[in-house]
Structure formats: C-alpha cells, structure tokens
C-alpha cells in the first residue's frame, strides 16, 4: 500500500523532475527527494521556509490521502446576510449559503450539484426541515447549481418539473463576471492562523490571524482576503450576476467569462499569473490590483504580469492596458461601486432584471430604490427567459422588475399564489410590479 509520504515524493518528482531543481526552488540541500518529510505548519515560519510549506499545501489541495477539511471559499467567506431580514428567520441564512455555494466553481472547473449544495447548506444551518429543503432546492436551481440525471427522491413534482424545464431548454444563467480568489492567500492564512482558533473548523473565518507581512508592503494573508471580500460585496450590491472561484480554475473554464476580477498584491502563484495572462491573450478582460504581483510562490521575481505595466501600477486610479483583443484593468486601492460599474460597462456586461422597491414622494411619485430583500436571477436561451424571484423574508414584498423590457410574466407553476401575478399583456416595457409571498421563490417565463 502506498504511503502518504511516497505519494508526496511522487508529486514532487513530477513537479520538479530533479533534486537540483527542487533545492533551487526551496533553497535547501537535500541529497534525494526520498529524504524529504512533509513540513510542519508552525505558527510563524521564517520567510525562507515558505516555499516548502506552500508546496505541501498545494499537494494537499490536489487530492492527497490526507483527511483534512478543505479551506474553500465557503469557509473563508461566508455569505452576506440579508440586512433587513428577521435574524430569527432561518430562510434568509439558508438562502444566502445556497446562493454562494451554487455560484462557486470547484477546482476542476465543475459546479456542485443541486443535491450537494442543498445538503451542505442544510448541514451548515443545522436544519432538516422539509419546507427549508424544498426552498433550498429551488434556490440552488435558481443560482445555477449543476442538474444531474438522477435527482434525490426528496424532490417534489414541481422541483423535478423546474429542473427538467431548465435542462430541456438548455437555459443558462445570465452572463456573469468571475471573481477569482488567489489560492496563495488561503495558504498563507492557513499557515499563520492561530492554532487554538476553532472558528475555521466551524465554518467561520479565523478570529485572529498573525499580521506579519514577510517584508512585503502589506500582510498578504490578511489584506488579500479583505480585498477579495470587498469585491464580492461590491459586486453583489451593484446587481451584476457573478460567480466565484479560486485561481486553480482551468483556463478553458476561465475563457467562458467576459470579465475576470482578481485582487492582487506583490505575491501570486506562478500558475495563477500564467492563467490570468493566458486569459487576456484569449481576448478576455482581467482586472488586477491594487498592486502588480512581482514575486511567485517560490519568493523569486516573476514578471509574467508586470511586463504589461512598464510604468508600474497606481493604487489610486483605474487604467486600461489593451493586449491584442483583450485588456487589463487596474483595480484601485479604494474600490467602490463605481469601480464595478466601470469594469462591467467596459467589458460589455450589463445588469439584467433587478428588483426595486417603490418609494414615492410628493415631489417624485415614481422614485424607486433597490430592494435588498428580493433577489432576481434570469436564465436564458436565445429569446427565452426564465425568471426567478426570491423573497427569503417573513413578510410579503412588492417589487418592480426593471432595467429590461418585459411584456408579461407567465407563472411556470400554476399555483393559486401566483395566479394574480400575471402582468397586463398590453404593457410593453418594464417595470412590472408583483407581490412575492414570504419565504418563497417564484418562477416565470418572461415575454
């Protein structure tokens, strides 16, 4: 039986080919790869000890026989809570976890199945309620989780009908932007997380993390994740469809997106630099910054991306550097909603249907504002549109669907609650006003 150490040795041989190459990368003096033992994870290793530690964590990521929890995006960045919802209502919390899980790409580029998303979210929220399970299944379908041929027997007839309709029509979620998380930041956080902290194992970010920066301009293990989390928050609040992945995503999957945003500081994996560079060469639009990565995971100079910015990178301005048919955007150090709007506009992405709340005044009777408690997702195939409208709160919500022409909405499921929500057939443009019952997800065919 092959031991874990032998698997690690074979992984190193495939990666470095020779002991001389490994010693050069690690700054060590091993006589043979067989002499290497897996490095420990000290609370605060010296900078020169990072290359072996980072290789060990990469090996664990790629499927070693080790039994350890995966340090994935869901554990690093829990979902944004619904701000106005009742804190005692389980529906909003479950919905947000399903929403984030269903939008995550796995390391091989695939997406979690609906049943996998629901099972994980239900376990995290510590519930086995049939009503919550049905709600979670619809939320997973809404946000693009993979539909497998054999669904769970726990699905209702309506949920099976919805999945079949999506699959039969080859419907796909709205064209999205992708927010990439540099895997090197997760590795550094894992190395420096306080050993007595139990929050990560419970599904929450570490409460405290060592702040040493390893002589970089910023502590990458804290600044990097903070930049990423702000990007997710801004993107979500601006109303653009998005997905999240880390930098292990294959290039062929990356090329499916018109815009990729990746927060970068001085250090980035060599493979991640090559991935982003190849994406832009393939006519993609990539946003990086606020600093250009100039050091790889072996702590050696690497100008794969820096070569496109001979004059450096400003932390206070957004610039476009065109490379063939693609382009690099520079992310400023102080990002705002205007940053996301600019990136999406320049790369050709646009908001789809968005829920707004009527807020009339005497002076402005038609004024509206975004409704954060109502979520809208559109699946498309040609001219066909399937519209999901979710209200995970305890109160009914009245919302206008705006920003896209809609003549009428036909309920996909003929339920009594949805029968009065068909819009006037004579109406030619949005907004269409509808009332969404509490703790529900409605589906419509838009015309």
Image: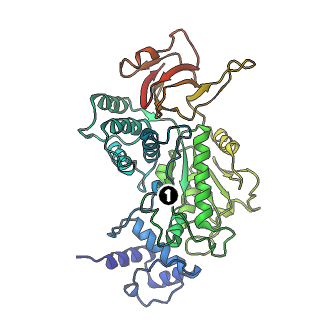
Identify the residue at horizontal 73%, vertical 59% (top origin): 313
Q: Please name whichever residue, 302 or 388, is drawn nearer the observer in this view of the structure.
A: 388
Identify the residue at horizontal 58%, vertical 59% (top origin): 225
Question: In this rendering, does residue 260 appear at all?
Answer: no
SS assignment at label 1: helix
Q: Is residue 95 left or right of residue 216?
A: left
Kindly indicate the quadrant of the structure image that contains residue 440. top left
Q: Which residue is most to the front? A: 88
Question: In this rendering, does residue 189 appear at all?
Answer: yes
The image quadrant where one finds the N terminus is: bottom left
The residue wearing badge 1 is: 76
Q: Is residue 209 left or right of residue 341?
A: left
Q: Residues within 10 Å of mark 1 (few under 14, many from 20)?
A: some
Q: Please name whichever residue, 88 or 238, is drawn nearer the observer in this view of the structure.
A: 88
Residue 74 horizontal/vertical position (percent): 46, 53
Mark count: 1
Q: Is residue 392 left or right of residue 116?
A: right
Residue 132 horizontal/vertical position (percent): 36, 38
In this rendering, the answer to whether 293 lies above or below 173 is: below
Q: Please name whichever residue, 98 or 285, is drawn nearer the observer in this view of the structure.
A: 98
Residue 174 horizontal/vertical position (percent): 50, 35
Residue 283 horizontal/vertical position (percent): 59, 47
Q: How is the image coloured?
A: rainbow
Kindly indicate the quadrant of the structure image that contains residue 349. top right
In this rendering, the answer to whether 278 lies above or below 153 is: below
Identify the residue at horizontal 28%, vertical 32% (top origin): 156
């Amino acid at each position: 039986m092959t031991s874990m150490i032998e698997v690690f040795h074979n992984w190193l041989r495939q990666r470095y080919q020779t002991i001389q190459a490994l010693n050069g990368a690690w700054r060590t003096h091993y006589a043979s790869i067989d002499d290497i033992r897996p490095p420990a994870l000290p609370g605060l290793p010296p900078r020169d000890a990072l290359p072996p530690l980072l290789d060990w964590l990469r090996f664990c990521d790629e499927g070693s026989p080790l039994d350890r929890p995966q340090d994935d995006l869901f554990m690093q960045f829990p979902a944004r809570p619904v701000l106005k919802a009742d804190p005692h209502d389980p529906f909003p919390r479950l919905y947000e976890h399903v929403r984030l899980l269903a939008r995550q790409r796995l390391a091989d580029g695939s997406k979690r199945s609906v049943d996998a998303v629901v099972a994980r979210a239900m376990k995290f929220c510590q519930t086995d309620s049939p009503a919550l399970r049905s709600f979670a299944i619809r939320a997973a379908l809404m946000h693009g989780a993979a539909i497998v041929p054999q669904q769970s027997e726990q699905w209702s007839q309506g949920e099976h009908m919805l999945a079949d309709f999506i699959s039969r029509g080859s419907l796909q979620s709205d064209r999205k932007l992708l927010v990439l998380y540099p895997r090197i930041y997760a590795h550094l956080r894992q190395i420096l997380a306080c050993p007595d902290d139990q929050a990560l194992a419970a599904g929450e970010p570490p409460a405290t993390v060592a702040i040493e920066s390893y002589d970089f301009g910023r502590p990458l293990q804290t600044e990097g994740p903070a930049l990423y989390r702000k990007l997710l928050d801004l993107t979500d609040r601006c109303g653009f469809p998005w997905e999240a992945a880390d930098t292990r995503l294959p290039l062929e999957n990356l090329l499916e997106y018109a815009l990729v945003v990746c927060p970068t500081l001085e250090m980035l994996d060599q493979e991640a630099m090559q991935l982003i560079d190849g994406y832009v060469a393939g006519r993609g639009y990539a946003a990086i910054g606020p600093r250009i990565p100039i050091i790889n995971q072996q702590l050696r100079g690497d100008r794969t991306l820096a070569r496109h910015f001979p004059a450096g990178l400003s932390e206070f301005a957004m610039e476009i550097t065109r490379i063939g048919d693609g382009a690099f955007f520079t992310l400023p150090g102080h990002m705002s909603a205007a940053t996301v709007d600019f990136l999406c506009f320049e790369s050709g992405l646009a908001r789809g249907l968005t829920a707004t709340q009527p807020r009339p005044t005497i002076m402005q009777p038609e004024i509206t504002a975004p409704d954060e408690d109502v979520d809208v997702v559109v699946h498309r195939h040609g001219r066909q549109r399937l519209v999901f409208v979710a209200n995970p709160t305890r109160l009914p919500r009245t919302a206008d669907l705006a920003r896209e022409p809609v003549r009428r909405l036909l309920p996909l499921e003929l339920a009594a609650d949805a029968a009065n929500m068909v819009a006037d057939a004579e109406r030619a443009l949005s907004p269409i006003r509808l009332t969404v019952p509490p703790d529900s997800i409605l589906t419509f065919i838009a015309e």
